[in-house]
Image (cartoon, rainbow, N blue to C red):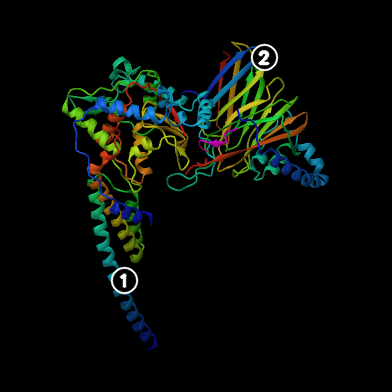
Amino acid sequence: MTGLAMAAALIAAPSFAAPAADAPDPAADLKAFQKYFRDKFPKVKFEDFVNGPYSMDEGLYRQWKEKEEFPPYEFALDLGKELMAKPFGNGKTLADCFPNKGVGIRQDYPYFDTEQGKVVTLELAVNQCREANGEPPYSYVKDEMAAVTAYMAFTSRGKPFDVKIPDDPRALAAYENGKRYFYTRRGQLNFSCATCHVQSPGERIRAEVLAPALGILNAMPIYRSEWSGMGTTSRRFTSCNSQVRGVPLKPQDEDYRDLEYYLSYVSNGLPISGPGARP
Amino acid sequence: MNGSSSDRATLSRRVVLQGIATIAVAGVAGLRFDLTGAFAAANDAYPEDAFRQKSEADAIKALYGKTAEASDKVRLDAPEIAENGAVVPVSVSSSLPDVTSIAILVPANPNTLAAAYRILPGTTAMVANRLKMAKTGNVIAVVEAGGKLYSAAKEVKVTIGGCGG
Amino acid sequence: MPRSILACAAALLLTAVAAPARAAEAAFKAAYASAEAANAEAGKLRNQWTTAVAALAAAKKAAEAGDFDKATSEARKSEQLSRAAIFQADEQKTNWKLMEIR
Amino acid sequence: MASSIRVRATSRGDTTEVQALVQHPMDSGFVKNARGELIPPHFIQRLAIEHDGKPVFVADWGPAVSKDPYLKFAFKGGKAGDELKVSWTDNKGATDQLTTKIQ
């Protein structure tokens, strides 16, 4: 039984001395994070990291380019545009909740909301808007949520991620929590997010070519062939957890929002490329 | 572009064998085939029967009523490794004159025939589409030109099957 | 007359079978309770394993079908998996930093 | 309801290149849903394209064509502003059509 073998391996693992906690320094993290990927993939152009596995594999790149001729997320974009402008029961629209009517603003999310004292992602902001206007929230993982975030990403393409960490200890704590979540091993496979997306991008796990963590959220939401449809950042996080045989948290759980905050911040400077298409 | 493929030699051998088998059958049923095989003729119905066939030979027979020979004038473009069996980009073109029809077959699928296209006068002998593949196997392009059938094949590796689940 | 003898024999046979069955059910209940507790503890650490949850569900299903041996073995498997998950979560509280890019 | 059909047709020289994308599940009948029941087959069987009322292309599809089918082909003739009609019929008898202009 692999589970028991895993348990044995865990127990037998030598316990390393944990490094001493040092003062959080997001700017230094960002520099080290981006340098790591540039050094690991000297041939990949910096802006190309947003193209995930397609930047790492020639055969995949060609199939992607062929799909991009008439991308499968086309229908989601149209639906997203429609939903942004469709009046709620009270006459207001989703667009009314966002700066510049939601156009060209994707790169500013997630942000730390000092009033709510928490990280607000684009997906959370969409549902907060709907609920504030007496509308039921969208499912976080696909359909309408994927469509509106696809539209917002599309109108922001090319704009560099610009996630800010305000001078607020709670914001820094959220960032650190996101980082912890990213590097923490979990599930029966004993994988962290970093196991796949830092140590092994470009390699195949079973059939899939792993995407680098750098720029991975710039392409969200994505049309995945594996899903035969669109999925949001929430969907990506929960499905990653299940794949390592861990029970996923609820979409937009605090840990997931903090993770998105961390991952987006360390990709600052890379252009928004969503909606993306992925195998 | 990585054109049609290294599998052509094996395919042509197979097609030849099938050809022999078909001649034997056609000796008896030849007349019927001549009548039903005119897929390229105008206002024909959806070829329901051809789409139900399990084997490559049966599907081609049901669709065209004749057999195909391998030709390097049929160009089949498909990836070496499909990123996902649910969406495999496949395109077919041909430099043969008087092309009237292009069909694409995936023998590894439950039903072999994937798509059949009628190329009307003035239309270029080229088509690109996206197909599902259940597992690794050949994609076969059949082109009808001047009343004869020509084919090409290419193996596509499928690591994530396109039949869901 | 022979009928009642047969009935008597059947009743005896039933009790003979029923006693170990009750013991098997009790063993299952104990195993299931501690598997459930371990699973809840892993949940508190936000680190349940899907395999542990699946084994727990399989245990319950087997018990409902009256197969207490299988139910007990699934429950024990679930508990072992949850224990490993708990160990992992505790160990990772500090060791996550080993993987950090710096 | 927005149309299920998206078309891009561009004329270059004497050739018009047409790309079409159709929103359709293309259920093969071999896939099970979350409850383990087979999803019945539901797929487009025929898609036809007419240029100024004259047929230029006919596609016959089986369930092995991918979800949200994509198609690219080209024909001689056709210039910017000409009408192009795309229509489809599926195995349940549903249909949709769209008329656009060549760019």
- From which residue to which does the magenta span run? B78-84
- The type of residue carrying mark 2 is Gly
Residue C64, image quadrant: bottom left
Residue D59 in percent (x, y) is at 63, 29
Give the vertical position of D100 relative to A176 (above or below).
Answer: above
Looking at the image, which residue is at 34% across and 43% down?
A191
**Is residue A106 rendered to the left or right of residue A59?**
left
* Pointers 1 and 2 in contact (C-beta within 8 Å): no
Query: Do the dots labelled 1 and 2 sit on one chain?
Result: no
How far apart marks 1 and 2 lie (CA) works out to 83 Å
Residue B92 in percent (x, y) is at 64, 29
The local secondary structure at tag 1 comes to: helix
- The type of residue carrying mark 1 is Ala
What label does residue C21 carry, if any? 1
Residue A5 in percent (x, y) is at 35, 55
Residue D38 in percent (x, y) is at 50, 46
Is residue C66 among the parts visible in the rendering? no
Name the residue carrying label 2: D77
The local secondary structure at tag 2 comes to: loop
Circle 2 residues within 10 Å: few <14, some 14–19, many ≥20? some
Is residue B82 on the magenta stretch? Answer: yes
Q: Chain of mark 2?
A: D
